[in-house]
Every structure is written in structure tokens, then in C-alpha cells.
Image (cartoon, rainbow, N blue to C red):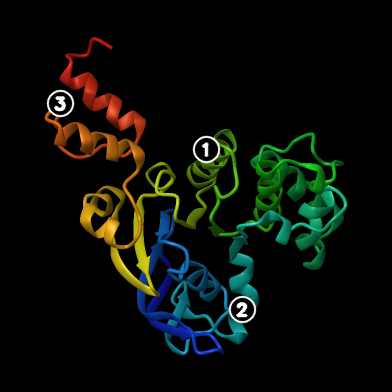
Amino acid sequence: MELITLSSVSFAYPDGTRALTDVNLSIMSGERVALLGANGAGKSTVFQMFNGLLMPAKGVVSFKGRPVEKAYLKEVRRRIGMVFQDPDDQLFSGTVRQEIAYGLTNLGMAKDRMEQAVSWALQAAELAGYEDRSPFNLSGGEKKRVALAGVLAMQPEVLVLDEPTAALDPLGAAKIIKLLNAINRQLGITVVFATHDVDAVPLLADRVYVMDRGEIKLSGSTEEVFARKDLIRAYNLRLPRVAHLAELLEREGICRFPALPLTIGGARAELVKKIGGRY
């Protein structure tokens, strides 16, 4: 089922800065989709179109086949949950429990149902035991999980994240990637994220849109997109580090791959084949 579509969408900010030009994309139910691009490519602007924070100057944004317009905004914003790049922009309550309950309180949810929803969101975001802690005293990765739990408590159909691994150490980034994959796989929630961290994309996306200067320049499966090495570099991006290493090994005549591996697991599988499964 097609959940979100942008059809020939263009947008400029009030100062005249053109942010999007004739953007077309579609996101299907259950997918994991990455918007990949350098800073200023237009990724965050696209996200603000999803739930009507910004309206296109031209073109149509639709959710489940219905244009995102004023009369539809309340429903859209319940179904599309947004997690900001900086969790401090999203957190303001005194405790983790209060933070997660905030949106449910605004909905007027009954207390017993709210407690169930908060407990479920804590478990889903791997935050059990954090209920009475201040979100402002947590690590960056923990803050991101609190912001995520607050969105999950609303039971969205789509989870939209702006730079989910930004400002995290390697362990924190790995935990967020693992958690988002579990949310997609176990809860059936569609995951859409914007990033310029190319190493995260093969671990978290089935399909990729590459943006540059407000336009969609390339789209396809993760493997298809990263196979276009020259275009990736032309848009101020790079290959995942594992793929770049494989490219160097091929260039030096040490090893050839049927397709450049994008993850450590993929590279290991290919190397095991080549050395006869001894490792």
C-alpha cells in the first residue's frame, strides 16, 4: 500500500531560497526508506512536507491517497511520527514517563490506557527502568530513544527520523539502527530517515532516494544506488567504507567481487566464498 507520495512538488522559502524542485517520491507500507544527500540537499524540507509543516508551492503531497490539506492535518500528524535530529529540540518534561505521556495527554486518553501505552513504548524503545529519570541527564543515544518512545506511544504508521545517528558514538549509533530495524520488523511500522551518513544506509534501508540541491537525482534499491559510484561522488557523497575498501582491493588486483559489498557481513560472505569457507 502506498502511504506517502510527493508528486511534482516544488517549494521556496520566504527569502526566495529554492528548496525543492519537481520532487517525486513514494513510500510504501512497511518499507525502510532513506533520503540520502549532503547538507542542504533538501531532505528536511521534504520531511516537513509529509505532515503539513510546510505546504508545496507546486505539486501535491498525499498520505494514503488523500492530499495533505488543513482538514486532514490532525489525522496525518497522528499517523506520521517525527523524530528530530537533536533530541533536545523535542524533550521538555521533567521525567521520561511524563515525556512519553505528553502527546497522549493532549489526546485526552484515559489514564489506564495511557499507562499501558507508556509502558509499551518504554519496552519498545528499550527504556524500561528509566521512567522516573530526567531526560536531560541522559546520554545522547538515550535521549534519542526517549524522543522515539514519545512518538511510538502515539502508535504511528510511519516513523520519520532526521539524521538518526547524528552526534552518536559508534555504540550508540549501532543501538539506534538495531532498534529501528526491530521496530520496522516486529511492529510493521514504516521507517523513513534522512541522512548523509552513508555507512548507516545499507544497515537501515531497503530503498534510497539521493537528493542534491532540492532535486531527486537517483533512486532505487540500496544496491542499485551505491552501484552508481560516479554519481554518488558527484553529489558530494561517498561509498560506504566497506564498499570503498572492496573497490581498492579490486583496483589493486587483489580480489574481485560480483558486486561491491556494502556491509561487513556482506564482505565477509564474499570472502568466505573465495577462500573456500575456511573461516
Indicate the secondary structure of the residue bearing disc 3.
Answer: loop
Q: Position of residue 79 (x, y in %)?
A: 59, 65
- For label 3, the crowd category at 10 Å Cα-Cα, with few meaning under 14, some 14 to 19 and many 20 or more, is few
Residue at image position (55%, 40%) is: 173
Query: 276 or 185, which is in the foreground?
Result: 276
Residue type at mark 3? Ile
Residue located farthest toward the left when viewing the structure as drawn? 253
User: Which disc, if any, is residue 254?
Assistant: 3
**Closer to viewer: mark 2 or mark 3:** 3
Quadrant position of residue 179: top right
Vertical arrangement, residue 109 with respect to residue 141, above or below: below
Quadrant position of residue 18: bottom left
Which residue, given by chain and number where applicable, does mark 1 sit on? 178
Which residue, given by chain and number where applicable, does mark 2 sit on? 73
Q: Position of residue 33 (x, y in %)?
A: 41, 56
Left-right relation of 72 to 43: right
